[in-house]
Amino acid sequence: MPKRSDTLSWDEYFMGLAHLSALRSKDPNTQVGAAIVDDNHRVVSVGYNGFPKGCSDDVFPWEREGRNLLEMKYAFVVHAELNAILNSARPVRGCTLYVSLFPCNECAKAIIQAGIVRIVYESDKYADTEATQASKMMLKAAGVELCRIENTIQLQVKKIPNESK
């Protein structure tokens, strides 16, 4: 019997892990997940967009608009890429970052400084913004390889109620 040939590529597999990580995000508008993987296909770290440890997601705002920065999530949320870098138990130098949304300019700085050499991303919905353009300029200048993946698995979670005995 021949082996299966319709398996996921490594990029599809690890993008699936990024999507799974995104399901942990409590952001009502945008859920982003990230996975950092070494050149031996070993997962080094994962992350998702959310508030820093100790900052309650019941207290800090999730709003996208407000009268000032303190009323919006942007001043408080840690992006998935940065969370994955900060949560890593070991250095991420030489690794690949899988992320469901192209990194912003702030995350690009951290990615470059951490030594990540390749980014595999799915969505580039903010490509026309100056922040994303700045991100791409820095990543290109630093020699970070950018690879957009289109064939990804989309996860749907079905919660199974606990059975009581």
Image (cartoon, grey):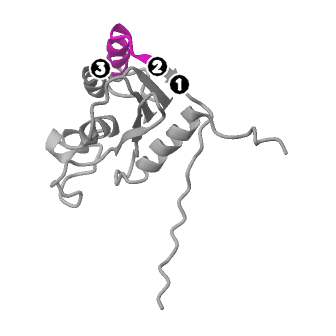
Check disc 2 and give the amino acid type. Answer: Leu
Give the secondary structure at mark 1. Answer: strand
Which of the two discs, 3 and 1, sits closer to the camera?
3
Q: Is residue 5 left or right of residue 107?
A: right
Give the secondary structure at mark 3. Answer: helix
Residue that numbered label 2 is attached to: 146
Q: Is residue 80 above or below residue 148?
A: below
In the rendered structure, are the residues bearing label 2 and label 3 in contact, judged by CB atoms less than 8 Å apart?
no
The spot of residue 29 in percent (x, y) is 39, 47
Q: Is residue 152 visible?
A: yes
The spot of residue 36 in percent (x, y) is 39, 35
Give the secondary structure at mark 2. Answer: strand
Circle 2: is it few (<14), some (14-19), or many (20+) Cα within 10 Å? Answer: some
Residue that numbered label 3 is attached to: 112
> Which span of residues is magenta-colored?
130-146
In the rendered structure, are the residues bearing label 1 and label 2 in contact, judged by CB atoms less than 8 Å apart?
yes
Check disc 1 and give the amino acid type. Answer: Arg
Which residue corresponds to the image point at 48% horizontal and 34% vertical from the top-left? 41
Q: Is residue 137 above or below residue 155?
A: above
Check disc 3 and give the amino acid type. Answer: Ile
The spot of residue 102 in percent (x, y) is 42, 28
Which residue corresponds to the image point at 38% horizontal and 11% vertical from the top-left? 143
Of the numbered discs in the image, which one, if any, rests on residue 148? 1
Q: Earlier in the sequence, mark 3 or mark 1?
A: 3
